[in-house]
């Protein structure tokens, strides 16, 4: 039975990965942060299962900014695999908290790698680093591959750039089995509500139920390569099963604008929109009712934007047979259905 340690276990990816590893028979240890409100919603269904809690699933308080805690956890758990998913993961927020983002996303990765080395675990423990397509930023090549030069465009991406290279360095310098998954955007009904896809499907469901009037957005011209999160957490596991550590792109090789995502979401809820005007004056009008359902607010613009991402996953396909299954329209359908259901439940509750 293998043992895995997951940072960021309470996040979107951490929750799917935990389910998948438990399914494979792993013992899973997760790092959680102390919070004044509940932050374990995505894994409560696992944590509340008596067959798992403190049997095969263990949670530990910790933080990627706290080395002594990382050292203790490594000593206690001595995991076969570490999945470093913990991060200040919001690009826009990283402009507001750049130093903290660097502490967690860059230095946090170094702290962990160094703790592995110092604990004498370098020949036992394999390390997965949650690297990102944000590294490509102002893209130098289309589509982006493992060989495309990086050009990060936010404090988040610059911090993740450090994380990427410190993985490569510890691999080369000390022979640690450490790999980067360069994952393009991946979404699901568990996506945080301030990321664009979930913000759209959540608001659209609520508008459909009369709980909200209008969706307010930033730049809807940017393009992303969106895939389905559980397929990407499966790729993380496959990356660590390779004999040799390496860096891999996971993506769909398809790109769509934020506007397309909005358009399709509203269509799926029978609220077709007509886009009128340009720039900050653009609006989306519901054709059937003439109501304004979309507005633009520069508050959501980023000081530097990543305009276009599209990834080539050929290496992942060749090395470990990974391919995305869920495509754009299906992803929008999954998320829209889930959030419409949630909105209907909210409406029912509000009526009682
Ligand atoms: P997420 O939902 O935002 O989850 C982030 C996780 O990190 C949460 O569990 C959070 O804990 C934890 N965390 C934040 N600060 C921490 C700290 N100082 N110490 C320890 N843990 C901390 O992110 P995600 O979408 O699952 O993404 C997982 C990882 O993949 C992240 O590193 C992200 O940057 C990277 N990534 C994501 C995508 C994507 O499209 N989703 C693409 C490429 C790379 P709380 O729950 O307490 O906040
Ligand atoms: N969040 C958000 N909110 N984004 C908006 C909005 C809005 O109101 N309006 C427009 N956007 C645009 C952003 O400007 C960006 O171009 C795009 O929608 C996607 O934004 P996010 O969903 O916040 O994701 P991201 O691409 O910046 O970052 C995510 O993907 C990365 C992988 O490429 C995060 O999950 C990162 O952690 C991850 O590394």
Image (spheres, rainbow, N blue to C red):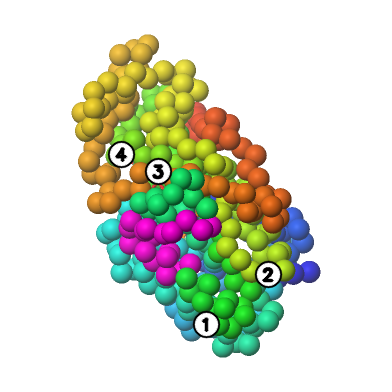
Above-or-below relation of 190 to 44: above
Relative placement, left or right, of 195 versus 242 is left
The residue wearing badge 2 is 244
The residue range painted magenta reads 146-164
Residue drawn at the location 63% of the way across and 54% of the way down: 315
Counting the numbered discs, the total is 4
Mark 1: give few (<14), some (14-19) or many (20+) Cα within 10 Å. some
Q: Quadrant of residue 149?
A: bottom left
Residue drawn at the location 50% of the way across and 23% of the way down: 268
The residue wearing badge 4 is 219
Residue drawn at the location 49% of the way across and 50% of the way down: 144
Q: Sequence-wise, which precedes: disc 4 or disc 2?
A: 4
Query: Magenta stretch: residue 314 in it?
Result: no
Query: Residue 114 has which mark?
Result: 1
Task: Describe the element under mark 1 as helix, strand or loop.
Answer: helix
Q: Quadrant of residue 218?
A: top left
Q: Does label 4 point to a residue whose CB lies under 8 Å from ligand 2? A: yes
């Amino acid at each position: 039975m293998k043992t895995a340690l997951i940072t960021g276990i309470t996040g979107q990816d951490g929750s799917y990965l935990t389910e998948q590893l438990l399914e494979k028979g792993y013992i899973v240890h997760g790092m959680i942060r102390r919070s004044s409100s509940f932050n374990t919603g995505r894994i409560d269904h696992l944590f509340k299962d008596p067959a798992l809690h403190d049997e095969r699933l263990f949670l530990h308080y910790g933080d990627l900014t706290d080395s002594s805690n990382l050292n203790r956890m490594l000593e206690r758990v001595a995991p076969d695999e570490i999945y470093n998913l913990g991060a200040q993961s919001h690009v826009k927020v990283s402009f507001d908290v750049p130093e903290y983002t660097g502490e967690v996303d860059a230095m946090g990765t170094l702290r962990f790698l160094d703790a592995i080395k110092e604990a004498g675990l370098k020949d036992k423990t394999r390390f997965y680093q949650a690297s990102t397509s944000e590294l490509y930023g102002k893209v130098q090549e289309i589509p982006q591959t493992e060989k495309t030069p990086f050009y990060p465009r936010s404090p988040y991406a610059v911090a993740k750039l450090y994380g990427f290279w410190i993985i490569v360095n510890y691999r080369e310098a000390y022979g640690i089995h450490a790999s980067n998954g360069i994952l393009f955007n991946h979404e699901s009904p568990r996506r945080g509500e301030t990321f664009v896809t979930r913000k759209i499907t959540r608001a659209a469901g609520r508008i459909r139920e009369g709980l909200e009037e209008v969706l307010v957005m930033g730049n809807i011209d940017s393009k992303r390569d969106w895939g389905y999160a559980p397929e990407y957490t499966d790729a993380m596991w496959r990356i660590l099963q390779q004999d040799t550590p390496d860096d891999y792109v996971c993506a769909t090789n398809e790109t769509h604008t934020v506007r397309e995502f909005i358009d399709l979401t509203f269509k799926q809820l029978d609220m077709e929109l007509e886009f009128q005007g340009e720039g900050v004056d653009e609006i989306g009008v519901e054709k059937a009712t003439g109501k304004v359902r979309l507005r633009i607010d520069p508050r959501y613009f980023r000081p530097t934007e990543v305009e276009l991402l599209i990834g080539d996953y050929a290496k992942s396909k060749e090395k470990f047979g990974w391919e995305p299954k869920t495509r754009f329209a299906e992803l929008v359908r999954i998320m829209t259905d889930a959030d419409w259901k949630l909105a209907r439940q909210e409406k029912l509750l509000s009526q009682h």
